[in-house]
Amino acid sequence: MPHRPLLDRRLKRNVPLIAANEFMGSIGFFFPITILIFKSLTGSYTLGMSVYSIMAFATAFFEIPTGVLSDRWGRRGVFIAGSLCEFLGVSCYALAFGSARPLWMLYLGITFYGLARSLFSGNNDAMIHESLVALKRKHQFPKAIGRFTSMGQAGLALGGIVCGLMLWAGLDYRTLVLLTLIPLSLNIFLATLTIEPPVHFIKEGNSLAHMKTAMKLIVKNKKLRLLALAVTIQNGTGFSSYYFTPGFLATVWPAWMVPLYRTGQNGIGAISFWFAGSVVRRLGAIRVLFVGSLIGNILGLLAYVTETFLSPFLLMLTQVTYALGTTANQSLQQENFSDAQRATMGSLISFSTSIVMGLATLFLGFLSDMTSPAMALTILLLSKAIFVFWIQRRLYTHHR
C-alpha cells in the first residue's frame, strides 16, 4: 500500500482519468447515424433496431455477474475490461461491411458493446464515489458525476461535428467506423492509468448471497424501490428512443444534417451536466427529477406531433432535463445504496432497465415499419410518460 500522500495524489487522478475515458469512448464518428448504418446493412428498421435489442438483452444477461465481480474483485480491472470490450464491439461493426452475414457480425459487435455497458454500469459510479470517500470529498459526488457525464456529452458533440463533415466530404459509412477505433484504443490506455480505490466492503462469501442481500435492500427501501422503478421505465424507453431518433430526423432534415443534431444535443448536454450537480444540490434531487421529467416529456411530445424542421431543436432542449434528471437519479441512488453492495445494487437497476430497453426497441422498430418513425416515437413516449409521472408523483409525495 503506498504512503498516504502518494496514494492521495494517485487517487486524485482517478476522477479526471475516468472522465477522459468517457470523453474518448464517446467520440464515435459513426454514433450519430448508427441506426442508418444498421438499416443499410440489414434492410429494415425492424432488423436494425433488433441489433440494439440484442445489446439490451446482452447487457441484462451480464449485469448481475459483472456487478458482483466489481464488488468482489475491484473497480479498476472491470473498468479496463469494459474499455477493451468497446473496442472489440466496434471492430466487429467494421467487419460487418463486406461480410456475407452482416447481421450476425452486428449481433456479435453489439454483444461486446452490451458487455461493456454492463461492466461500466454500477462500477464507474462506485469507483468515483469510493475515490472521493478515500479523499474525504464525498460531498463532491453530485458535482463529480455531473462533470464526468458532461465529458461524455462533449465527446458525442465532437463526434457529431466530425461525422457531419465526413459525410459532407463524401466518406462512406465503413470509414467512419474504422476511424472510431483510434479514440477507443487510446481509451484502453487511459483506463490502465487509474488505481483501485482503497474502499472495498464486500462481506458475503459467495456471489449469490451478495446479490440476494442487494435485492433485499432495494425492496425494503421504499424510496429506493420507487426510484428504481421510475429509472427502469424512464431510461429503458429513453435509450431505445435515443438510438432510433436519427430515423425520425432523416424524415425532417437532409441526411448530412442528421449528425449536427447530435452535436447540438450533446453540446447542450455537456453544458447542462457540467452545472447539474450545483442545481441538484440547490433545489433538491427529487424536485429536480419530478419537474425535469415532466418538462422533458412535453417537449418531446411537441417535437414528434408537429414533425417539422424545428422538431429536432425541441428535442435538443430535452437534453437539459435529461442532464438534470440523470444527475439527480445517480445522486439519490448512491445516497441509498449500501457500501457493501454499491455496484451490485446499481447493476440490478441497470438489469431491469436493459430488459425494458430490449422490449421497447423491438416494439419501436416494428411499429415504425408499420406506421412512421414519428408515430412510433409518440406512442412510446406517451406510454412511458403516464407510468413515470405516476411513480415520480408518489416518490415526491413520500419525500414531502
Image: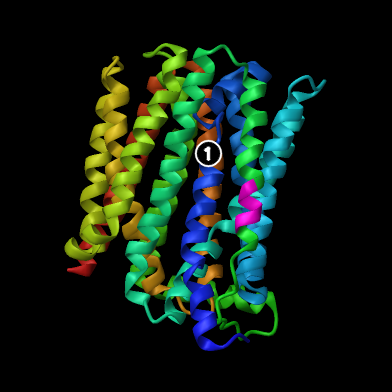
Give the vertical position of 394 relative to 363 (above or below).
Answer: below
Q: Amino acid at mark 1?
A: Ile
Asked if residue 109 lies in the magenta stretch, the reply is no
For the C terminus, the image quarter is bottom left
Q: Quadrant of residue 300?
A: top left
Task: Tell me: 297 left or right of 144.
Answer: left
Assign a secondary structure to mark 1: loop
Q: Which residues are magenta?
A: 186-190
Residue in the image at 47% along x and 64% along y: 15
Q: Nearer the viewer, residue 163 or 356?
A: 163
Instruction: Assign the magenta stretch its main secondary structure.
Output: helix
Does 134 appear above or below 180?
below
Please tell me how crowded label 1 is: few (under 14), some (14-19), or many (20+) other residues with Cα within 10 Å: many
Tell me the quadrant of the picture where the N terminus can be found: bottom right
Asked where in the image residue 49 lies, by quadrant, the reply is top right
Q: Is residue 189 magenta?
A: yes
- Point out residue 33 in the picture as x, y percentages from the top left corner: 52, 25
When the figure is inspected, residue 103 is found, relative to residue 150, above or below; the finding is: above
On the image, the x and y values in percent for residue 286 come to: 25, 61
Q: Give the image's coloring scheme.
A: rainbow
Which residue corresponds to mark 1? 27
Q: Is residue 7 left or right of residue 279?
A: right
Residue 319 visible in the shown view = yes
Question: Which residue lies at the image location 34% right of the left edge and 42% below the top edge?
Answer: 269
* Residue at 60% from the left image edge and 69% from the top image edge: 75
Is 40 positioned to the left or the right of 361 in the image?
A: right
Residue 195 locus on image (x, y percent): 60, 71
